[in-house]
Image: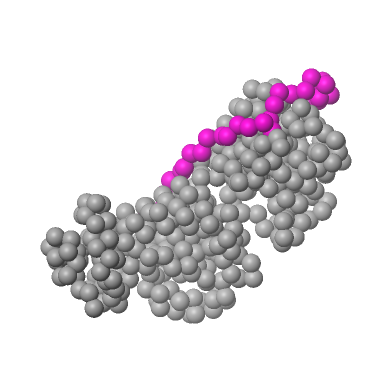
Amino acid sequence: MVNQRQIAQAAKVSISTVSKALSGGAETQRLHPDTVQRIHKVAIKLGYQPNDHARALRSKRSGLIGVYFGSGHQIQGRPVVSGYVPAHTLDGIEKAVVHAGYDLLLINFTHALGHPKRLETVLLRKQLDGLICIGLSETPEIYDLLIKRQLPTVAIEDLPTDHPAPSITMDCSQAISDVLDHLTSLGHRHIGYIGPLHDNVSPAQVLRHEELVKQLRQRQLPWSDQQCIDGSNTSQVIARQDNFCLKDGVVGMKQLLDRKAPVTAVIAYNDLAAAGAMQTLAQRKIQCPDQVSIVGFGNYDIAQSLWPDLTTIPYPLVEMGQAAGKHLLAHLQDAKAPTTIPVTTHTIKSPLVIRRSTGPVNSIAQKEHV
């Protein structure tokens, strides 16, 4: 068994420095990053195996940060970590948390939601130091319990409701403003929107839709329900299975065209829906962007694989995950901080990526809609 004394001798530092470097949390943060990295390399080379249980007893910290995904990111009660949003968000969280000496634990609360005592037992058994939630607003029962247990919690893309939480969100207002600046600079005034064609819409998606309508009206641009297809006015509901986002775009664009909605540009709620919308345009022999411009959301890998490649608002998932991790760790490392984190919202800006799916208004289409 390799001990910390042997690591100290090999790294040419004191035993207390080794202890701080391997402890994680606030003690680790007080050391120079190069020193921490050197000690970790020596520890790995010597085959050191830390005793997490002993460390937890000494520090009264488990070194564990939980990550919870709400029902919108689950299938049959299990987190879908292979999905684009969870995978990229986890990447950002890991960059912040693991570097500071903590470990991540993926938490599944769904099956315990109907049994508050069981849910509480799960939290107590894991002895988490803190929790990062994606989709917390979908399960307010959990936040009630987190407040009761005084577990420091940060939400990603959670919005102020009856259960507010300290959160990291995308700057939705700026993103929508950038899209409308771009489209209006190309001469577009009649702008449509394709949202999810089901009723399980995330709060972030609702906010983006509301922000779009608000800014269109502020700019005195034409707007009516005819220009919008979503779960509230669709003639065909799409089940949340298989490639449902793509189907939302295919069906949503068909409905916009069939109702002869006066639009020269369409904003889709994500890039997959935008891809579906472009598929329908191609089937109807309507050229993009010459006749209809398309804007997506997310900057997924597919955005650059389409033809024409997609103008889109990047979803800063890695940056949001990293910011959530840093915000939680800053709270944990502040000895004077209250048990729970004050309710504040930190926004992350994300500039529009302009590609070839948007172009100037076709003169014939413009005359038709004036």
Give the quadrant of the C terminus: top right
State which quadrant residue 334 falls in: bottom left
Query: Magenta residues, as a range?
Result: 342-370
Q: Position of residue 39 (x, y in %)?
A: 23, 60
Q: Position of residue 36 (x, y in %)?
A: 24, 57
Residue at x-position 52% and y-position 71%: 108
State which quadrant residue 99 falls in: bottom left
**Rendered view: 267 above or below 328:** above
Q: Nearer the viewer, residue 276 or 151?
A: 276
Q: Position of residue 250 (x, y in %)?
A: 78, 47
Can residue 150 be seen from the camera position used here?
no
Magenta stretch contains residue 143: no
Magenta stretch contains residue 350: yes
**Rendered view: 123 above or below 203:** below
Q: Position of residue 196 (x, y in %)?
A: 70, 51
Relative to residue 354, is residue 267 drawn left or right?
right
**Rendered view: 251 above or below 150:** above
Relative to residue 177, is residue 19 drawn left or right?
left
Can residue 367 be seen from the camera position used here?
yes
Circle count: 0
Q: Nearer the viewer, residue 109 or 15?
A: 15
Relative to residue 141, is residue 281 drawn left or right?
right
Residue at x-position 21% and y-position 54%: 35
Residue at x-position 58% and y-position 34%: 353
